[in-house]
Image (cartoon, helix red, strand yellow):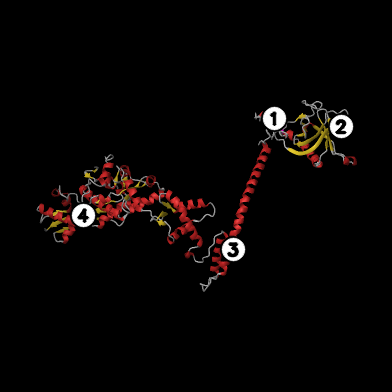
Amino acid sequence: MQKLADFKLPQFFNYPPYFTLQPVRDTREKQIQLWKELILDYCKSQKIFLIGVEEDFPLFSNSAIDRSLSHEAKETFLSAIVGEGRAEWLDKGHRKCLILWHRIQDWADIILQFVRDNGLEDSVMTVEEIRSGTESHGTELQGIDRTILMRALKLLENKGKLALFKGTSADDEGVKFSV
Amino acid sequence: MASGSSIGVGGLFVNAEVTTSGRPVLRRNEVECFLLSSVDFDSEDDPPRFTALKSGNLILTTHRLIWIPSEPNGAVPSSIPLAAVTHIFSHKKSIKSMFHSPRIRFQADPGSIVVTIVFRGKGDFDCFLTKFWECWRGRAWDEEDKSETETSRSGGSATVAQGLYGNDGTVRMVGLAGILRKEQEQWESTDKSLQDAFQDLNALMSKAKEMVSLAEKMRQKLLSAPSSQNSSTDDEEMGSKEEMQQWMLSVGIISPVTKESAGALYHQELSRQLADFVRIPLEQAGGMISLTDMYYHFNRARGTELISPDDLWQACTLWEKFDVPVMLRKFDSGVMVIQNKSHSDEEVMSRIRMLVTKTEALRAGVTASDAALTLKIAPAMAKEHLLTAETKGLLCRDMSPDGLRFYFNLFPEIDLTNLHIVKDFGTYGEWVKATSILSV
């Protein structure tokens, strides 16, 4: 079966109707579900956090069968993911979609785990360090989207697990854990 | 009687070619102008300078005087070219000439021979004289010589048989005369066919008379029946109703109804007739036929008294009121079809299912035309069936660069919990096999 990078594609990726938005309700429902799963799986494996609807997204076309999703189809599928809380539109024009293959809550839990794993319970770190520091190498936090990270951190702040503070520059935004 | 090549002295007369039925063979552009019978050509000289030609038909043409013997008496048809005529003597009417047959004297070359034409028969002599002068003055042979030298200079072709009449007596279509003759013939044949048509028309008219009188009776009934239902009888309304009835009557349709919803008698009868007619085209079309196709078939069969599309539709909608084995059906797409009541969608579905589960169809899908070919129905019908199958979940669509295609719907068979699983049984597996030839 085909691969996109190192991602193994399912057989139905070569099924031409998969790329045409189905008009019949029941069929469409199933189609939406399949795309949702596929998008989330792919984004997770490739650590993709953002999909630009107007940009070329490898998953949205299949050159082997010469098919690609229409704009309407892309919007439909992404909106379905947004509807389930696994994605967010970043603009009113629905051009950019933030993919939450982990929900914010899940990310928050991962951060907490990360803190515990690395003995950072009372430490201070910059936000940037969380996503690119040595401790995060090899973890899911490595390369995490800043927006998502901030949201997760804010969530934890609301729970009193940490405190966010501004540094001398944007890059220096810091976190004091009190896990 | 001389039967040599020349009768007169020095060849005054030229032998005239005639057809087997005795008509003269005319030269190119030569046109007949006058015909007289019982004509003699005499020489008044003593001794006569040529042997007289007695009792023949005289034909004046634009180019010649032709004399043809009326009885086969050995005389040879002869002619004098008008070009050879040097002088026509004026005709003096005298008391003497009143008792004699009219005659004309003219002088012709070679030899300045004086010829007298004696008219012993009944004919318009004065008219002949006028025409004789005209033709002689007209010098039609001059123009011909001119054009002949021109064409020979320019290397024009010479036709073998000259003249308007072929040797076998048929009229040849050459030259201006030919064109005129052709037009004449066309007029004659049109005239004839018009005459024939009028025979039919007469028959038609007599039928029409019956229809008109019937319509008139109905109309009287209509007018006498008061529409007292409406308390406030709109004059306008009445006027337009009448107009409609008038119109319907004028085309031979009898409509005794004032409210449309009741359905005109015309529509009822049409409806029944249509239900009978529909049977055969429906069978041929495989059980389902679009309304537009039926419109075409029905009107074609009718020949005259064509019905409008609206009439057809009305007639079909009335079927539900009668017990007929056919029905009108409207698809979601708006397409209207006529189908047998017994027509089963299930049967069509199973045929479609068989079609789309074949290896090639699994791999590449089917178009409406593919389906039409296999199911042996019209492409428009095939498309409707495919759309219906899609609605039922049997098929799903693929918007390919070449157009709309339909595939067997595999979506239900795909497992959401494990996207990579393909069960051994089921069409999904079949599809994977069918496409495995292509996979990269």
Q: Chain of mark 4?
A: A
Q: Chain of mark 3?
A: B
Along the line of sight, which residue is nearer the eye, B303 or B186?
Answer: B303
Q: CA distance from mark 3 to mark 1?
A: 74 Å
Q: Which residue is mark 3?
A: B216
Along the line of sight, which residue is nearer the eye, B348 or A94?
Answer: B348
Q: Is residue B145 magenta?
A: yes
Q: Which amino acid does the dot numbered 4 rest on?
A: Ile
Magenta segment main secondary structure: helix
Q: Which residue is mark 4?
A: A148
Mark 2: secondary structure: loop
Identify the magenta region. Answer: B144-150
Q: Which amino acid does the dot numbered 3 rest on?
A: Glu
Q: Position of residue B87 (x, y in %)?
A: 82, 34
Q: Which residue is mark 1?
A: B149
Q: Which residue is mark 2?
A: B44
| Mark 4 in CB contact with mark 3 (< 8 angstroms) | no
Mark 3: secondary structure: helix
* Marks 4/3 same chain: no
Q: Position of residue A173 (x, y in %)?
A: 18, 55
Q: Which amino acid does the dot numbered 1 rest on?
A: Thr
| Dot 1 crowding, Cα within 10 Å, few <14, some 14–19, many 20+ | few
Q: Chain of mark 2?
A: B
Nearer the N terminus, badge 3 or badge 1? 1
Q: Nearer the viewer, mark 1 or mark 4?
A: 1
Rendered view: B173 above or below B271: above
Q: CA distance from mark 1 to mark 4?
A: 106 Å
* Marks 2/4 same chain: no
Q: Nearer the viewer, mark 4 or mark 3?
A: 3
Residue B397 in sight: no
Q: Position of residue A126 (x, y in %)?
A: 16, 53
Mark 1: secondary structure: helix
